[in-house]
Image (cartoon, rainbow, N blue to C red):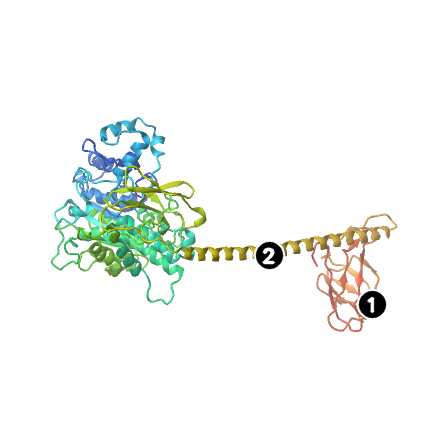
Amino acid sequence: MVYIHGESYEWNAGNPYDGRVLASFGGVIVVTINYRLGVLGFLPAVDRSARGNYGLMDQVAALHWIQDNIREFGGNTRNVTVFGQGYGAACVNLLMLSPMAKGLFQRAIMHSGSALSSWAIARDAITHTMYIARILDCPAQDSTALVECMRKKKLEDIMGVQIQIPDHLSGFGPTVDGIVLPQDPADIMEKSSSLFTQYDLMFGTTRVESYFHFTAMEERFGIDSARRDRLLRTLVRNLYTYHLQEIFLTVVNEYMDWSRSFLQASDIFDGTVDALGDALVVAPVIRAGTYHSGGIPREDAYPSPSLQPAAKGKKTFFYIFNHQSEFADYSTRLGCITGEDLPYIFGAPLVDSLSHFSTNYTRAEVTLSEIVITYWTNFAKFGDPNAPSHSGEVHMDNVRGRYERIVWPLYEPIHQKYISISMKPRIRDHYHAHRLSYWLNLIPRLHDSGDGNTSIQHHRLHDHDNPYSYDGVVRHRDNSGSIYPAFTTPFPEEERVQIIEPQPNETSKNVNITVKIETEVVVPVPEKHPVGNFTKPPAEDPSVYSTALIVTIAVGCSLLILNVVIFAGIYYQKEKDSLEKKLQKTYYEEHRSEDDEGHPSGEKPFLVKDLSSSMMLNQYCPPAEFDGSQTLDLVQPSKAKHQFQGPGKGTEACEGQFHLGPRMPQGEREIGIREPLLSSSKSHTITAKVDCLQAWEHPAQEMTVFGIDGRS
């Protein structure tokens, strides 16, 4: 089993993926490879004198090495399976289409990716190559001279060239060069006699395939319709050329929940996540799988019972990985996201630590990983995930009964059955059929250039040239269809944007508008259009912007005044508390000096820190007219319990509390201690000023004494 890493055509490696658990538990040999990436791996050939697709050629070279050497490891050269995730899955798909890889492997597994995704082929790579050549001062018209010039440049100079890559597309990646990839992938796949159908294929996706297009805050609180529209407008503009407004409105209509009276921000977020995931991953991979099984020829988008798999005996299997780990690193609200199937394929739950995967799994997830490994290795060995492996008894002992009763069916274009892999597996059919029919059937029919009399304006989005109506990097086409350098859409906040007046361009009928946010980005916008009855859309009514500006200023001033009032209140309260503390401190110091003068022995009293020990307190409460201070004598008790002796009979009380004798006030009254308790180390005398509020006429009234440290 040969794993091709994904994530991007620009970065990553095969080294982080540890195949030891998969190899030992599944009884297979696992190979991970590295290949050149970015401009070093996918610099396209600008003419016939050179060859591109170096990254794909590296993968082919690795497969040749396996054919020459895998026997030394106990491998079988006639039983090789290539599998990959994301961009790696697209590479797997492209290897199935390339005559350069013919006979080097027999089966393929594509996780969350295919050659039909918009990002799988770098269609504008030559444009970016010309830009890099100009920056590095290299000849751009001759591939041989360009390569020789770039080889003399420092790596940091080459990698330092900043290129604006439109969202959902690839700057440098596999290209249709006529050698490694002879034709466009879709054109090859729709031919029933192509190399594509000569391999067994397993393909599938996870529940959520566009999670990383959003922030954690957006996932938690949702997004508004304006943000949704900007995202979908960027998607439509970068993926399609004709009837963009119709396609955009169709997508918005389909992914809106019309059963709700009012759409919450979370509902809009969920619909947008599904729209991006279906467009970029799910629909393309299902289309590729359906092509492999013999369905959806381009002339007839609706499969008929007469369709049969092109290559007899070659099998197609489809899965949806629906389980999200209990201790996942991501929110559980949406479900399983891109890449969460990989830990279970490589066996991370079976060991304490494996590569970069999580280390915390439940017992049930250990069993699920064993099931997944068994399915994957059975397919690699026999071309059927249901077939028992050579060590099947060991495997099946750990498989739950509900999986033992399930047979994973073949995928074919009529019933379109698949397995939902989770704690409760299910065999289902027609995965999100209605939703995906827009991408598989309706939108391909809408995306038609029509007759030559259709104006260019008709094919564009409304407000096409407004950079604030997009989110991310979009590409720009002129009237002839050629692509200008992409531009980055600014975040829609007027205070961050400065529009510089357009300056005429000497070489074309265009003007350059520089949008200055944090860096200057040039946005070419057509001013006059030589073909068709095309005029710029009318400018927006200035009164709308004036009203919005007035409302914004009014709200801002109101919030400013409110903040000033709150700040003034907090400042006043703080100053008041500080003044009270100063007065209290002054009062304490004055009375402490008076108490010090009352000690003839000259010994300075110290503060009592703990009144929690047992003590005998002999005291009495003076009559109501008494307003002076009373000296309380404290002696050590002979028993552990508190015994407080009043003028009447003694009573027991809880720690820190005591009952006075007779002559207590009617109702609950407070006896306030006005200053900290002071004690002499020899006489053990506590001195405190006690205010008796009323004459004491009734017994059994409770009073609490607090020490200086706050303990009662």
Q: Nearer the viewer, residue 645 or 106?
A: 106
Q: Residue at x 64, y 53 (%)?
A: 571
Between disc 2 and disc 1, the foreground one is 2
Q: Nearer the viewer, residue 648 or 466?
A: 466
Could you tell whether 409 is left or right of 587 in the image?
left
Marks 2 and 1, Cα distance to the nearest angstrom?
54 Å
On the question of residue 394 being in view, the answer is no
Name the amino acid, label 2. Answer: Ile
Q: Which residue is mark 2?
A: 566
Against 317, residue 659 (above or below) is below
- Earlier sequence position, callout 2 versus callout 1: 2
Name the amino acid, label 1. Answer: Pro
Q: Nearer the viewer, residue 477 or 51?
A: 477
Could you tell whether 647 is left or right of 568 in the image?
right
Where is residue 557 shown, x and y percent of the image?
53, 55
Q: Which residue is mark 1?
A: 647
On the question of residue 432 being in view, the answer is yes
